[in-house]
Amino acid sequence: MVEAVDNSLMELLEKEIIEILDARTSPKTLYDYMRYHLGWMDENLKPIDLYRGKRFRPILCLLVYYSLSGVYDKALPAAAAIELIHNFSLIHDDIEDRDEERRHRPTVWKIWGDAQAINAGDGMHVLANLAALRLRDMIVTDSKVLEILGILNETVMVLCEGQYLDISFETRRDVTSAEYLDMIYRKTAALIESAVISGAILATEDKAVIEDFRIFGRDLGMAFQIRDDIIGTWCDTESTGKPQGSDIENKKKTLPVIYTFENCSQDERSKLDEIYDKAALSRADVDYVIRLMDSKSAYDYAVKTAASYEKNALAALKRINLASEAEEKILALTDFLIKRDY
């Protein structure tokens, strides 16, 4: 990520979000919970310098705006709003999934309880809308501000739909690949798509350019999530900070798992049903599922599917015919997101 994005962009984004939070002074602790989640504070709510996540969604927004305008500043409020939306959804996801750690630290709910974590997440959602309204300070027209707000709020609704589907899949054995792809569009790709569209809408009135950027963002988001599925099953602990097969241990219905369910024999399916009926999976159970996935070439299928989305995304980007420097910046980030191992 360091190689893919100029650190100055990260600094611009952090400054914008800090200003948004610092404008809220009371009750300070509520906003400190948000700062903790964002990686700016430790468990004692003291300032700390930690890894704060990829921040690639807002960076994509800034890069797209730059690619069409030659500057970054006018898109900063929209980029900050996108990052706040992403993080409020993570706070809520952690509560719903009962995840006790994120980025190698206890989650907000684990330290301060469900109720205060919900407050922090809800508050961050509202701050995302207030962040987008700062576009007015950049002399963005009211019609464009409303358009961006509409896109962001529609995306939050789609995120909720995706999270609902993801949770509902946990108790189902008949989830199809098509259902899964629809779910990850809603839960993951839609926000990436919105980040890209927001940058484009702020920079141009060209509908064809905006549409090609929409396709680029959508298909990049799909490839990104499928890469996450691959990482969650096959990448090692040193890369991910989680045990190999962590998604299987958590009984997540990822694309490789669904593909294996769809392509196994009756005996293999009976064994899978027996494993997934357990309250908790053992290491032996996880290893069996991985071996079965390997025997069905589930890894190759996931890689091929991600590559197909990547190809569509890059074709859409190429149609826009950007200046070489701007295209190189976007391609560098795209390459990182699709080939990463964490």
Image (cartoon, rainbow, N blue to C red):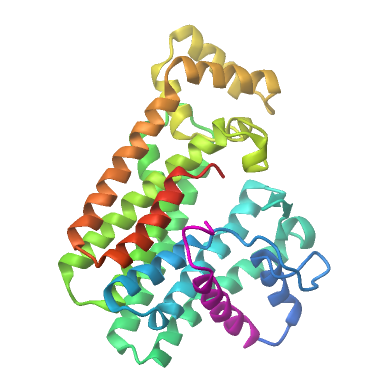
Task: Indicate left or right for 49 with 17 as reference.
Answer: right
Task: Indicate left or right for 7 with 304 as reference.
Answer: right
Which sits in the foreground, 180 or 220?
220
Image coords of residue 163 (percent x, y): 49, 50
The structure residue drawn at horizontal position 68% and vertical position 18%, both measured from the top left corner, is 284
Asked if residue 306 is positioned above or below residue 4 in the image, the reply reads above
The structure residue drawn at horizontal position 33% and vertical position 88%, both measured from the top left corner, is 140
The answer to whether residue 169 is visible is no
> Mostly what secondary structure, the magenta segment?
helix
Task: Indicate left or right for 313 with 89 as reference.
Answer: left
Query: Does the magenta portion include 316?
Result: no
Asked if residue 304 is positioned above or below residue 143 in the image, the reply reads above
Query: Does the magenta portion include 17?
Result: yes
Image coords of residue 169 (percent x, y): 49, 37
The structure residue drawn at horizontal position 59% and vertical position 24%, both measured from the top left corner, is 276
The structure residue drawn at horizontal position 22% and vertical position 60%, both measured from the top left corner, is 212
Q: Give the range drawn in magenta.
A: 1-23
Image coords of residue 281 (percent x, y): 67, 25
Picture quadrant where residue 146 is located: bottom left
Asked if residue 161 is positioned above or below residue 5 in the image, the reply reads above
